[in-house]
């Protein structure tokens, strides 16, 4: 495990994020992993941050509301099977890790596990959360992403990056 700055490999990590990264939550003994392809990496309030976007219908949303902690994994290996399962199956009723054969390893800082794959990991703690609202959204974005799923907006979880590292 190699400690690196939060913006290490930023171009590579943002390219991975645009395809599929993994957001891991853990609450009351249950770990859930979801696919995320929307997010942002940057600096706010002089803090390194990752902004996760999670729809309110997702099980991960419920866990984030409870724990306010998560990890992000940018996989540096092919993970097509995991992407399919983590992106299409609900952790409310299925153990997605068991289904994929993937596992987690303990995180170093935030008390949240990280996906045990080669890649870069961010351990995050939510410092601000906000649910989107239709009245502030560009109508073209509304039509493209939200008209088919009424009242299923994303919440923005602006999160301080507490730790960042690469695992082989």
Image (cartoon, rainbow, N blue to C red):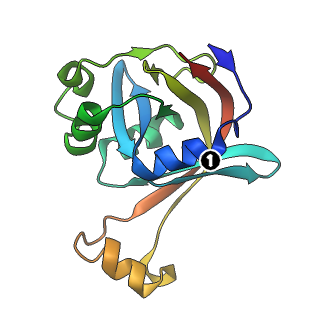
101 is higher (above) or lower (below) than 144:
above
Q: Is residue 45 left or right of residue 60?
A: right
- Please tell me which residue lies in front, 77 or 7: 77
Give percent across and percent down for residue 103. 34, 16
Residue at horizontal 41 percent and vertical 78 percent from the top? 141
Q: Is residue 136 left or right of residue 29?
A: right
Residue at horizontal 48 percent and vertical 47 percent from the top? 17
- Please tell me which residue lies in front, 143 or 14: 14
Tell me, yes or no, if residue 147 can be seen here. yes
Give percent across and percent down for residue 157. 54, 50
Q: Is residue 101 left or right of residue 125?
A: left
Residue at horizontal 48 percent and vertical 44 percent from the top? 16
Residue at horizontal 36 percent and vertical 18 percent from the top? 29
Q: Count numbered badges in the picture.
A: 1
Give percent across and percent down for residue 139. 41, 86
Q: Which residue is mark 1?
A: 11
Furthest-bottom residue in this view: 139
Local SS, label 1:
helix
Tell me, yes or no, if residue 159 can be seen here. no
- Badge 1 crowding class, 10 Å Cα cut-off, few under 14, some 14 to 19, many 20 or more, is few
Q: Is residue 152 left or right of residue 132?
A: left
Give percent across and percent down for residue 126. 60, 42
The quarter of the rendered structure image containing the N terminus is: top right
The answer to which image quadrant residue 148 occupies is: bottom left
84 is higher (above) or lower (below) than 26:
below
């Amino acid at each position: 495990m190699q400690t690196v700055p939060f913006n290490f490999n930023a171009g590579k990590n943002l390219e991975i994020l645009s395809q599929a990264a993994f957001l891991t939550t853990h609450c009351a003994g249950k770990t859930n992993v979801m696919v995320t392809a929307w997010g942002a990496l940057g600096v706010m309030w002089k803090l390194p941050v990752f902004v996760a976007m999670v729809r309110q219908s997702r099980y991960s949303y419920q866990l984030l509301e409870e724990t306010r902690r998560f990890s992000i994994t940018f996989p540096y290996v092919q993970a097509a099977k995991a992407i399919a399962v983590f992106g299409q199956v609900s952790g409310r009723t299925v153990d997605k890790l068991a289904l994929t054969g993937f596992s987690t390893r303990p995180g170093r800082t935030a008390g949240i596990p990280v996906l045990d794959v080669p890649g870069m990991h961010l351990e995050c703690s939510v410092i601000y959360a906000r649910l989107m609202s239709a009245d502030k959204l560009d109508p073209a974005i509304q039509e493209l992403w939200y008209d088919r799923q009424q009242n299923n907006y994303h919440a923005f979880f602006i999160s301080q990056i507490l730790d960042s590292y690469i695992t082989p």
